[in-house]
Amino acid sequence: MSVRLRGTDSAIAIRWIPKYTTLERALHWVHTASFIPLVLTGFVLFAPWLQPVAQSEAGTHIRLIHRLAAVFFGGVPIVYTLLQPRRMLMNLREFLSFSKYDLLWLKGAIPYYVLGRHEDMPPQPRFNTGERLTAVVMVLGTVTFGITGLSMWFLKGIMPTWLYQVMVLFHDLMFIVTFAMFMVHFYLAVIHPMMWQSLVSMRYGVVSESYAREHHTMWYYGEKRAKEMWEQRHKGEEH
Amino acid sequence: MSTNANRYAMYIDASKCMACRGCQVACKQWNDNRGYIPGVRETQNIGSYENPLSLDPQTWTRIRFIEYDDPDRGLQWLFLKQGCMHCGEAACVEACPTGALKYGPNGIITYERELCNGCGYCSQFCPFGIPQLEVTNLVTGEAKSSKCFFCQDRTTNGLKPACVKTCPAGALDWGDREEMVTKAKARVDRLKNELGFPRANVYGETQLGGLGRLYVLTAPAEAYGLPADPKFPVMGTLWQKVVQPVGQAVFGLTVVGAIAAFFIARRNVHMEEVE
């Protein structure tokens, strides 16, 4: 695809590399569209200063919206597993593979994202360390919310009260972890000046060749070649 | 926590109760609660006079029938008037996210049905399992909680609760909590020293900040199915006093951190270098 440069007759060609399937993008936005109402309605019972909204009919409706949204939120991984089981497994496997480059990535992340020092960033596969950590939390969150949420929904009065209390506590703890993570995810994907391509990829399913080369070297060059390039560059620096 | 000044309490003398269940009827009558509803709430014969089988959304007090083999007196039939304890430190009040349950006047744990959104946390955090949730729709979660509120409409107007008023055995009384404690202790003394109940005791004087129900029991609390040392649920404290404030702090810090990072990044990141 070529992009015409504003105010000139010149055009530059950009090679786009597919990153996500249509289903993955659709489910990502269903996930987002259900997570936000879940946060807003859950926060009503979480924060004491929102008590007026939790009361009476309003509270009953808030709880109903929470349940409705939860059905979609929980439906996402189920639909994904049913329709693209191989993609799901592939992603899951990628999420769970960490290496020494991830430690280097974590070390370089703050200078990189805050100060823009990108020279020191180690090679990364299709998902970088941060993305993979996010994904792991998301998987844990889905499981925790599924167990605790369904218990609180259907087993109240059936399960022992101490267990119910544990469910409430873990639901809240997981909310803190996932919502804090969501805010970081939102910041990096939507607000951060450098990361505009991640939003593009979640909309169109593709990233530019230059972006892939810069941010996901192992994915672009292959793992072996990317590692060699990294070692070579570092040898040069040491001498 | 409710203040101990001006606290009222219900005196319940289990040694005088004859399980006529007039209190159950009076409670339903005054509070307009239904008894028998064909197909929904029916009476069942379980081989005991105990009926209904438990507290329910329309039954805020009831008599438990317990057969107890007393080491001193042989087989005893114990009667326990169940209902909200109106704790000095009430887990339901802390757990309720709507403020429908409150520390009210005279130590009553008041309940405003209109404010209840049906979450049912009160029923799950009460150490005595008292609040009853009437679930009208399990899927949508539509529900209302209910429990005894010491006939607030009567007691704040100088009357006694309906159950106390009706008790023909004189087993129930209502008044200033200190007076009720004195009365209960005097009765226990008499039971022990004159009437041959060596293990008579007062229940509710100190538990959970002092209960609003003071029981005179002729056997240990456990024999009546009461927890000897009820505890404020640890999970409730952890949830309300630790997890929620920590969560709000985490959210606040994340937002502040992201805003700060954005402004620093905007100054330092040069797109032409990156792309």
Image: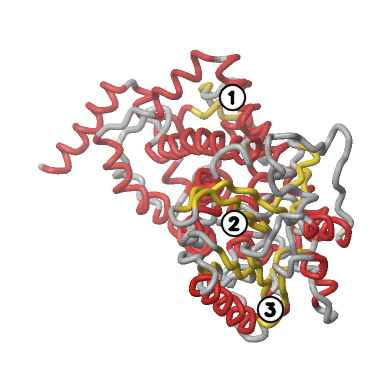
Q: Which type of secondary structure does the marked residue at label 3 adopt?
A: strand
The residue carrying mark 1 is A24
Task: Indicate the amino acid at tag 2.
Answer: Cys
- Whole-number angstrom distance, CA of label 3 to CA of label 1: 62 Å
Question: What x and y, as percent, mark residue A63?
Answer: 72, 46
Q: Chain of mark 3?
A: B
Q: Which residue is more in the foreground, A151 or B260?
A: A151
Please identify the residue farthest to the left as the structure is shown. A239
Question: What x and y, as percent, mark residue A42?
Answer: 65, 50
Residue B16 is marked as: none
Q: Are marks 3 and 1 in contact (CB under 8 Å)?
A: no
Tell me, yes or no, if residue B243 can be seen here: no
Q: Is residue A6 left or right of residue A61?
A: left
Question: What x and y, as percent, mark residue A3?
Answer: 62, 30
- Whole-number angstrom distance, CA of label 2 to CA of label 3: 20 Å
The residue carrying mark 2 is B126
The residue carrying mark 3 is B8
